[in-house]
Image (tube, grey):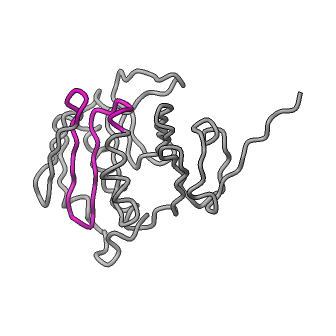
Amino acid sequence: MATAVAARIGPTDHGRSMTLDEFMESETDEGCRYELARGVLEVTEVPNDPHGQVVSNLYRALARFAERCPGVVRRFGGGSEFRIWLPGMATGRNPDLGVVLQGAPKDQRGRRVPALVGEVVSTQSAVRDYEAKPLEYLAFGVLEYWIIDPSKRQVTILYRDGDVWREQVFRDDHALVSLVLPDFATTPAELWIDVEEDDLGEAP
């Protein structure tokens, strides 16, 4: 019996209709990021330096927290390290940040579920990050969603309250308040360190 060959998707497939099963089984061309949004493939360029700098600054803050408060975080990462599948919504996302806590349960694929996810906003991703992904991450069971917006110089944190989000916005030197990571210590201003003003908003 012949083995089915996985489909290959690339930049020209942006906007293509797919099922989640098709998306999960597909091979991808390098150099782009791929997400499925309500049955429609979204292909974007790999983020450039400004986006990556913000993510690096965030990871450094998380590493400091994990060292200062051992026993809370199991692991953290982003990009392809965390794949959030929502079969009922025909959606597959790869958040910029995922944080798995100690004792986190495993999903049906045997992967531990992140309690916190975050996205770094750009001009191209603003609608997805502010409008589409909150509903998707809520449906997935995420406890906290961070929307990190360099162009607005602000971090919006959504906290799960049953089946809805509560929202708080942080700016400048006001310490971020995380219910998932008590005593987490960083500010929005620290996330913009070494990010060049002319590049804000340009990263996919």
Residue placed most toward the observer, 155 or 78: 155
Task: Indicate whether residue 139 is drawn in magenta.
Answer: yes
Residue 30 falls in which quadrant of the image? bottom right
Total marks shown come to 0
Image quarter where the N terminus lies is top right
Residue 165: x %, y % from top left: 22, 37
Q: What is the span of residues highlighted in magenta in the rendered image? A: 137-164
In this picture, residue 161 sits left or right of residue 13: left
Left or right: residue 33 versus residue 168 is right
Q: Position of residue 177 (x, y in %)?
A: 15, 42
Q: Which residue is situated farthest in the bottom direction here?
A: 198
Quarter of the image with the C terminus is bottom left
Q: Residue at x 47, y 23 (%)?
A: 107
Q: Position of residue 158 (x, y in %)?
A: 22, 42
- Check if residue 30 falls in the magenta segment: no
Left-right relation of 172 to 204:
left
Image coordinates for residue 5, horizontal then vertical, percent: 78, 40
Q: Is residue 168 left or right of residue 6?
A: left
As drawn, the residue found furthest toward the left would be: 174
Q: Residue at x 52, y 63 (%)?
A: 45
Q: Residue at x 70, y 50 (%)?
A: 8
